[in-house]
Image: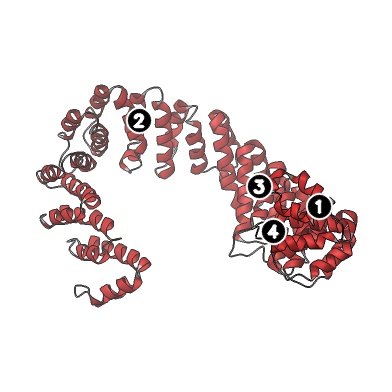
Amino acid sequence: MEAVAALDSTPFAEGALRLRDLVRALSAEEIPLALEEVRKHKDPDPYALISALASRWAEIDLHGAIDHGLAWKDDENKKTFFAALVSKWMKTNFSAASAWAQSQPPGPTRDAVISTMAGELQKHDPKEALALARHMSTQQGSEWIATQIFTEWIHSDPAAVAAACGEWNLVSLHLFDSTQPLPRSMESIGEIWGRKDPKAALAWAAGLPPTSASRDMLKKISESWAKRDPAAALAWISHSEDKSLHPEVINTAIGTLAAKDLSAAMAQIEALPADERSDATLAAALKNGAKTSPETAARLFQQLPEGTPRNEVALSICKALAATDPRNALDWLVHQAPQTISSGQGSQVSTVLQNWLAKSPGEAVAWTRGLPPGKTRDIVLNSTVSLLVNSDLKLAQSVFEELSPQAQGEAAAAFAQHYATQDIDEARAWAAALPGGRGQSMAFQALADVGAETDPQEAAKWINTLPQGDSRDRAIIPFTRKIMWDDPDGAMDWALSISDPMDRQDQLDEIAERWNQFNPRAAQSWINSCPQLTPEQRRHLLTK
């Protein structure tokens, strides 16, 4: 069989045309011999050859090919053979091919054939492809084929897909489950149809079984619409009876409008019914509007009540003002929104300060020193020191000296980390010389953190030299967090030495929880045998 030998030795890389010509030269009597040669061959991927031979045999002797293939044992070669055979058959007589496929006993061969037919069919008749998918051997297989069909079909006709979903009774197929997210194909309906026709997509989503997943889809479609076309979304939501959607749609639409035209967004807020106007809506307008109209946003800012949204708006205004005048931006923040700095949300302050210090360090430092005494000044000075310590140590030291021991905090930690990179023993001596207070506690904390990374044994010796009290406790906490993965029992022993009862229990809880995750037997053994724990503490830690 010269043709068979040629097939066996021809690399696929020589091209599909060569393969086609070789297969076409075979007679109906030679094809089964060629197939046996291919099946005996050790080629790890005989897919192309088997598919080509099956397709050719279907052309010249369909029933002989079927009889031959049915005699094979169920394996990948058999599935490949029948998938290719039916792919050719369905092009000339689809109804006969479909009837034959459905008449086969449940199993991998039937599923491979139906999957192939559905895949071909979905390109021009997805409804028929879905009907065929019902004949897979398992429900899981049917759902998988349906998902593939929906995923492709959704791009051309999402409305038809939505209708087909209803006809397919997705609830009975468990594609909707109140405890599970929507399948990806269903999410795609909302996403794609929502972009093409959001009103229709929302009407469809509202008719889905009432689960948390379908509620999420409603929210996603409506909020996405509010971002793309805020005016249309606002008009729609004004007539929607689903009040749960109103706040997010309104806030998203107003925020989108404000990013382009804050005045127009404010006019839109005024046009809302009184019960639809909220502080969150105003915050959304000012936060986004500050990007293009910071002065207007700053003027309206005081209408917001205290709280997180107000702080976020303040930072957005400060950032926008700082683009042209950092002094003006920080002056406004300090005088109009000092609570934003004192609440711990002042990271934007550090960003503005960093840029200002890089351009005009003397001017920026003079401004920080000129702030009135109080918590805001202490926070800003700490940020200034932390930003300067690696670029202008002398200037950072002079600013640091203006802080009280209780106010040094982050600045002391920044100095400790800086000194530790040069000589950790000198850094420890520097921290020990600080007056007791928050500054020293945070310096010790920073040094313990560095030491646990670089030399945990030396760090442990150093911590043991510290007197009992808050500063020692601050050093133990980061140290135990670093060593608990490699030495959990040692970390527990260190946690037991923390003097503050609340901090001690918090650290024991944290270590026990992690230890119980990666080695519960060892954790439980240590907890049960530790003489320093009370029975109540043991019971508590064993539940972590």
What is the number of the mark on residue 208?
A: 4
Asked if labels 2 and 1 touch by Cβ distance under 8 angstroms, the answer is no
| Above or below: residue 264 compared with residue 220 | above
Quadrant of the snapshot with the N terminus: bottom right
Secondary element at tag 4: loop
Secondary element at tag 3: helix
Residue annotated with mark 2? 352
Q: Earlier in the sequence, mark 4 or mark 2?
A: 4
Q: Amino acid at mark 3?
A: Glu
Label 4 to label 2, Cα distance in Å? Answer: 49 Å
In this view, the residue in front, 412 or 10, is 10
Residue annotated with mark 1? 23
Residue at the front extreme?
A: 2
Q: Earlier in the sequence, mark 1 or mark 3?
A: 1
| Above or below: residue 345 compared with residue 497 | above
Q: Residue at x 25, y 67 (%)?
A: 489
What is the number of the mark on residue 191?
A: 3
Q: Earlier in the sequence, mark 3 or mark 2?
A: 3
Label 1 to label 4, Cα distance in Å? Answer: 52 Å
| Image quarter of residue 529 | bottom left
